[in-house]
Image (spheres, rainbow, N blue to C red):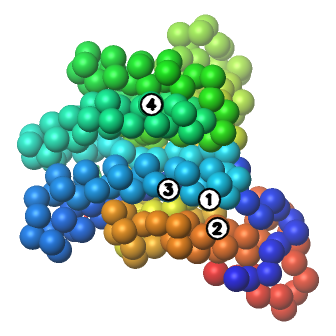
Amino acid sequence: MPAANSAHATVPRHVAIVMDGNGRWAKRRFMPRFFGHEQGMETLLRVIDVFAARGVQYLTVFAFSSENWKRPDEEVSGLMNLVLIGVAKYLKKLAAEGVRIRIVGDRAGVSDKLRAAWDEAEAGTAANTRIQLSVAFNYGGRWDVVQACQRAVADGLAPAQIDEAALAQRMALAFAPDPDLFIRTGGEMRVSNFLLWQTAYAELYFSNCLWPDFGAAEVDAALAAYAGRDRRFGGVRSAPEGVPQGA
Ligand code: IPE
Ligand code: IPE
Ligand code: MG
């Protein structure tokens, strides 16, 4: 593990994850893609607790992007159903474990049934404080910026009043600090329209691990890499010259 950097808290307050690789994981087992998504949900349930145990306060996961509607109908409806299954199967457990759930994304585009399940998940965990889980569903970073602008206009702001703070407080994750650490599993090194605004200064971490295989060891590897980063936010290097910056 690289030496901890004193310039920032060694444990990120907010971790954002692109949970990628479910389809490939299933394909390698000669199984349908949906099997990978089912396993991916189990993985999420396990890792929430690991992040909470390590002291992470906010966890935001990408579950369905604005662009995932391009997938075959069968896969899309499978993913929608998985949300209903997940809420029915795990809401009580998550509520008991102190997880506060929020759904972030465009609610207008999903069925009444799904919206009702989300409302139930949010209402049933609203008093929890151990870890704040945000599930990005029908979410796109560009959608988020556009809806924040629309809300600013609807709120009657004049052009000169539309500054970074005015937009930040209207973004989908306005209740949370910006992510400190961005993790993408599955080997692809791209953002795929996740939190474009909020990750301006996130530390990026890419793992070849396919999401269903992600576990405590991978969480710890990502957190160790983060602890060794030198975060500068446009300022100057804090570690003495010659000290390696870690992974
Ligand atoms: C990520 O896994 C989950 C969703 C996008 C819902 P993928 O389904 O993208 O899996 P790969 O990338 O095809 O392996
Ligand atoms: C990003 O993964 C979206 C989610 C994990 C929900 P994708 O698999 O959709 O991204 P691309 O298509 O590889 O960029
Ligand atoms: Mg993918």
Foreground disc of the pair 4, 3: 4
The tag on residue 181 is 1
Q: Is residue 120 above or below residue 199?
A: above
Which amino acid is tagged 1? Leu
Foreground disc of the pair 1, 4: 4
Q: Distance between the residues labelled 4 and 3?
A: 17 Å
| Sequence-first disc among 1 and 4 | 4
Q: Residue furthest bottom?
A: 242
| Sequence-first disc among 1 and 3 | 3
Q: Which of 48 and 59 is in front in this view?
A: 48
Q: Distance between the residues labelled 2 and 3?
A: 13 Å
Q: Is residue 173 visible?
A: no
| Sequence-first disc among 4 and 3 | 3
Residue at 82%, 62% (x, y): give it. Answer: 8
Q: Are marks 1 and 2 in contact (CB under 8 Å)?
A: yes
Residue at 80%, 75% (x, y): give it. Answer: 4
Foreground disc of the pair 1, 3: 3
Question: Which type of secondary structure does the marked residue at label 4 adopt?
Answer: helix
Question: Which type of secondary structure does the marked residue at label 1 adopt?
Answer: strand
Q: Name the residue under label 3.
A: 47
Question: Which type of secondary structure does the marked residue at label 2 adopt?
Answer: helix
Percent x, y of residue 7: 86, 65
The tag on residue 141 is none
| Sequence-first disc among 1 and 2 | 1
